[in-house]
Amino acid sequence: MNATQQTSTKSSQKSKGLGFFEKYLTVWVLICIALGILLGRYAPEVATYLDSLSIYIGEAPVISIPIAICLFFMMYPIMVKIDFS
């Protein structure tokens, strides 16, 4: 086999379809939204605390530190091209 055939064979072996997490991503997002709503409803002090972790300019929050941290960890594997398989 030449290098082109080996590369195409390796790439076809890697793509096995969607994993469990990716397949049900919409469900996970809906669960997180529901948990966030319930948390804000039944534990408003947690929402107030998380809101206090924002960077404000005047009266308006400009950057939410918890959201910025979550976004960083969500995008980091893509930035460094980590393959979890």
Image (cartoon, rainbow, N blue to C red):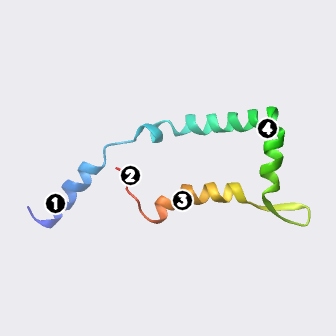
Q: Secondary structure at mark 3?
A: helix
Q: Earlier in the sequence, mark 1 or mark 4?
A: 1
Residue 4 point in image, percent of width and height: 17, 64
The residue singled out by tag 2 in the image is: 84
Q: What's the amino acid at mark 3? A: Met
Neighbours of disc 2 within 10 Å: few (<14), some (14-19), many (20+): few
Q: What's the amino acid at mark 1? A: Gln
Q: What's the amino acid at mark 2? A: Phe
Q: Earlier in the sequence, mark 3 or mark 1?
A: 1
Q: Earlier in the sequence, mark 4 or mark 2?
A: 4
- CB under 8 Å between callouts 3 and 4? no
The image's mark for residue 75 is 3
The residue singled out by tag 1 in the image is: 6
Image quadrant of residue 45?
top right
The residue singled out by tag 4 in the image is: 40
Q: What's the amino acid at mark 4? A: Gly
Q: Secondary structure at mark 2?
A: loop
Neighbours of disc 3 within 10 Å: few (<14), some (14-19), many (20+): few
Between marks 1 and 2 in the image, the one whose residue lies nearer the viewer = 2
Out of 1 and 46, give the one closest to the viewer: 46
Q: Earlier in the sequence, mark 1 or mark 2?
A: 1
Q: Earlier in the sequence, mark 3 or mark 4?
A: 4
Q: Secondary structure at mark 4?
A: helix
Gap in angstroms between the C-alphas marked 4 and 2: 34 Å
Image quadrant of residue 55?
bottom right
